[in-house]
Image: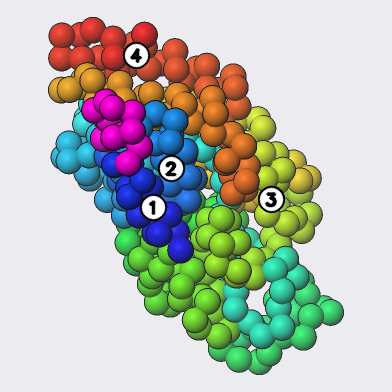
Amino acid sequence: MIKSVLLRVAAGVVVGAASLGAQAADITGAGASFPYPIYAKWADQYQKVSGNRVNYQSIGSGGGQQQIIAKTVDFGASDAPMAPAELEKNHLFQFPAIIGGIVPVVNVKGIKPGQLILSGPVLADVFLGKITKWNDPAIKALNPDVDLPGVAIIVVHRADGSGTTFGWTNYLSRVSPAWKQQVGEGKAVKWPVGQGGKGNEGVAAYVRQLHNSIGYVEYAYAKQNVLAWTRLKNREGHAVQPSQDAFSSAAANADWAGTEGMGVILNDEPGAASWPITSASFILLHKAQDDPGRGHEVLAFFDWAFEHGGDLAKGLDYVPMPASVIDQIEKAWKTGIRGTDNSAVWK
């Protein structure tokens, strides 16, 4: 379903460009699957108003980083922020574009969305293979009134290099010393148990097909695939539902300006209403643009998305970047992204 959205975007562009009687810009991006639903929606609407096409491929954050470094796309996208040293090494500029939440999803007979409660330490033990049955005492203690079967838990994780995996494993490393010691965090890790799906799409498909399974996806994928997400206990001890308000609460006190490369990680943030696995998704461009016109078109697309795409984002349960952060981002564009003659790409 999600991929069909982008196919419709591509199909509609030719007609739109022809009707405008002008040559349309055609820019390419690749990377994280976490923001794919909103980037596809933005691209669709942007083409309708501008005639310009944005072709974004959902290949995972690792692939997005590799492709922008290799200059095979106009922009890369990653949910795992690149470290300042890596940005400097590859002469890349990074900025956040959207905020969302990563949610555990389950396929257990009779369990409805938001019914089951889990905690970070319990999730870590499930993905470590220490908790193997749905009626394990640790899960029952969180859900005394839920009828849980005494069957094996099937763990589903990402098979590709993934910013969603970075967000997930970063969170588990924060709440479980055992996870931090035995597995750690990263876009790809050595999973103790489970089977892998490619992209948020692949994990959602596996969980939908496999009874008694558990996985993790961006919230929009859980809703679009009618999966049962769980509540999570946050650092204040409250069992919260994933929602736009819960993601906003987690992002409320982020220090974007004080974080080099704006690479803020929003996991396990304080606040009674905060969702504990919240993530920004980042855009990567080369600081020196070989083709300043194409670089300008990339920034024009995100400028339009920041100004006009907020309601579209909210409709898919993402959190738009705050206005104050957008101001910081666009000021940084003016000085941080230049043509080969050192002229500003964005003025």
Label count reads 4
Residue 5 appears at what percent x and percent y? Answer: 43, 54
Marks 2/4: CA–CA distance: 23 Å
The disc labelled 4 sits on which kind of residue? Answer: Trp
Which tag, 2 or 3, sits closer to the chain's start?
2
Q: Tell me the CA gap for discs 1 and 4.
A: 30 Å
Q: Residue at x 17, y 41 (%)?
A: 72
- Residue that badge 3 annotates: 243
Q: Is residue 125 visible?
A: no
Say left or right for 111 vs 8. Answer: right
Q: Are marks 1 and 2 in contact (CB under 8 Å)?
A: yes
Give the residue type that dot 2 points to. Asp
For the residues marked 3 and 4, what is the alpha-carbon distance in whole angstroms?
A: 34 Å
The nearer-to-camera label among 2 and 3 is: 2
| 91 up-or-down from 143: above or below | above
Q: Which mark is residue 167?
A: none
Viewport quadrant of the C terminus: top left
User: What's the residue type where badge 3 is placed?
Assistant: Ser
Q: Assess disc 1: are there few (<14), some (14-19) or many (≥20) residues with their C-alpha within 10 Å of its C-alpha.
A: few
Stretch in magenta? 15-27
Residue 44, numbered circle: 2
Q: Disc 1 designates what residue?
A: 8
Pointer 2 and pointer 4: residues touching (CB < 8 Å)?
no
Q: Percent from the top left, x then y, of residue 283?
A: 38, 35
Q: CA distance from mark 2 to mark 3?
A: 24 Å
Q: Earlier in the sequence, mark 3 or mark 4?
A: 3
Tag 1: amino acid: Arg
**Which residue bears the numbered disc 4?**
346
Who comes first in sequence, dot 1 or dot 4? 1
Q: CA distance from mark 1 to mark 2?
A: 8 Å
